[in-house]
Image (cartoon, rainbow, N blue to C red):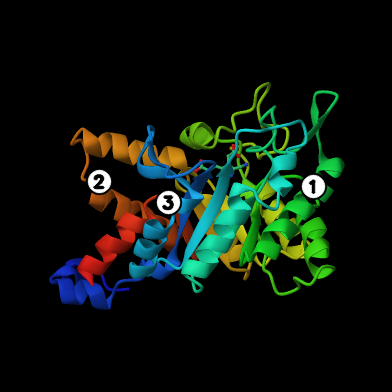
């Protein structure tokens, strides 16, 4: 390898055209998935305090948002339901007329090409706010599995394109795969939140989704943040159970996990740029402390560079618009 003065790294940074030629990774609107929070009621579009620019939508208010996402070439949305009637086992998750079930039908009718991904987890539907059934004060793994499988089937029957289990129970991917295969949905992919950490970055989401645990925390099922080898085992487990896409979550504080997962597996990889990551950028930008647009594109670019194929982000809509301006 030549050394300075024969080697001059700056030669290839001289102009936008040169930089473009040697650019190693590219962020594209086609990489992005936009999360949507669906609430009960009519005519609702209400901004979430801790997530400026992100709204609660009632099913009848979704149309304009979906049109805009389609126009910006954002290929997919991820749906979360926010419900009022909660119980011990989260039975509202299985309601054929539930908010997510209705939203899937409405979106697929309005924009048939939009990929509708649905979050499969009970925490938005249980009165205790945990991601599974609670038995003797503990979240019970095995009795939660059939409920998750039924929830996935319910969403698939309404037209969901991809189901995305986020509960972190062991064996849920296999249980969901079997339920889908046995009921006419062999073709529906599973995007598993394979390496999901017990993270403080979910704070704004829990406010938005009303899903904070009412006792204890999620550390007995979500991963311990210092671990990375364990993440690779989680991902391997989910691939072996039949996951089609595996996800690392959160993204920004776990770029090393994304990068290692990329090197270790050939499965498509997703990363979730979560609510707290979004809120930090918005808070600093609103004070003029950072350039929100540049910071956002840099963050999303870092997730891409680390190796994610799919990026789920609350920035998806604005980022797609910015990328379009630059193109
Ligand atoms: C449901 C779920 C959560 C998120 C996605 N699905 C919250 C949690 O596990 O507490 C977090 C998303 C975000 O923070 O943007 N289990």
> Gap between marks 2 and 3, in whole Å?
28 Å
The numbered mark at residue 211 is none
To which residue does mark 1 refer? 147
Left or right of residue 27: residue 164: right
Residue in the picture at 31% in, 55% down? 318
Q: Which circle, 1 or 3, is nearer the viewer?
A: 3
Q: Where does residue 65 sit, x and y in percent of width and height?
A: 38, 57
How crowded pointer 1 is (Cα within 10 Å; few <14, some 14-19, many 20+) is rated as many
Nearer the observer, 188 or 255: 188
Relative height, residue 69 to residue 254 (above, below): below
Most extreme residue toward the left, as rendered? 15
Mark 1–mark 3 contact, CB under 8 Å? no
- SS for callout 1: helix
**SS at circle 3:** helix
Task: Identify the residue position indicated by label 2 in the image.
Answer: 292
Q: Is residue 37 above or below residue 280?
A: below
Quarter of the image where the N terminus is located: bottom left
Which x, y percent locates residue 62? 44, 54
Q: Are marks 1 and 2 in contact (CB under 8 Å)?
A: no
Q: Position of residue 234 (x, y in %)?
A: 71, 52
The disc, 1 or 2, on the residue closer to the chain's N-terminal end is: 1
Question: Is 294 displayed left or right of 153 in the figure?
Answer: left
Question: Element type at marker 2?
Answer: helix
Q: Residue at x 24, y 52 (%)?
A: 294
Q: Quadrant of residue 281?
A: top left
Quarter of the figure that contains the C terminus: bottom left
Q: Is residue 10 above or below residue 255?
A: below
> Can you identify the residue that label 3 sits on?
61
Q: Residues within 10 Å of mark 3 (few under 14, many from 20)?
A: some
């Amino acid at each position: 390898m030549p050394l300075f003065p024969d080697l001059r790294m700056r030669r290839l940074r001289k102009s936008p055209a040169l930089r473009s030629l040697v650019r190693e990774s590219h962020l594209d609107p086609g990489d992005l998935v936009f999360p949507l929070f669906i609430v009960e009621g009519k005519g609702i579009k209400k901004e979430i305090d801790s997530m400026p620019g992100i709204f609660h939508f009632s099913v009848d208010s979704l149309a304009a948002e979906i049109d805009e996402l389609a126009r910006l070439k954002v290929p997919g949305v991820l749906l979360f339901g926010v419900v009022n009637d909660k119980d011990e086992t989260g039975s509202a998750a299985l309601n054929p007329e539930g908010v997510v079930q209705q939203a899937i039908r409405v979106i697929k009718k309005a924009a048939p090409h939009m990929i509708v991904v649905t979050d499969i987890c009970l925490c938005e539907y249980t009165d205790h706010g945990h991601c599974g059934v609670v038995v003797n004060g503990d979240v019970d793994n095995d009795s939660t599995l059939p409920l998750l499988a039924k929830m996935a089937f319910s969403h698939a029957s309404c037209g969901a394109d991809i189901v995305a289990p986020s509960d972190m129970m062991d064996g849920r991917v296999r249980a969901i795969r079997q339920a889908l295969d046995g009921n006419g949905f062999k073709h529906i992919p599973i995007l598993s939140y394979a390496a999901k950490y017990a993270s403080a970055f979910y704070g704004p989401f829990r406010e938005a989704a009303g899903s904070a645990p009412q006792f204890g925390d999620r550390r007995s099922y979500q991963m311990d943040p210092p671990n990375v080898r364990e993440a690779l085992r989680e991902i391997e487990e989910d691939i072996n159970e039949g996951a089609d896409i595996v996800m690392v979550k959160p993204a920004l504080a776990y770029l090393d996990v994304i990068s290692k997962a990329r090197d270790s597996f050939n499965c498509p990889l997703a990363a979730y740029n979560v609510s707290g990551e979004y809120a930090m950028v918005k808070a600093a930008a609103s004070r003029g402390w950072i350039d929100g647009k540049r910071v956002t594109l840099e963050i999303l670019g870092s997730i891409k560079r680390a190796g994610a194929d799919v990026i789920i982000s609350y920035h998806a809509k604005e980022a797609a618009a910015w990328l379009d301006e630059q193109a």
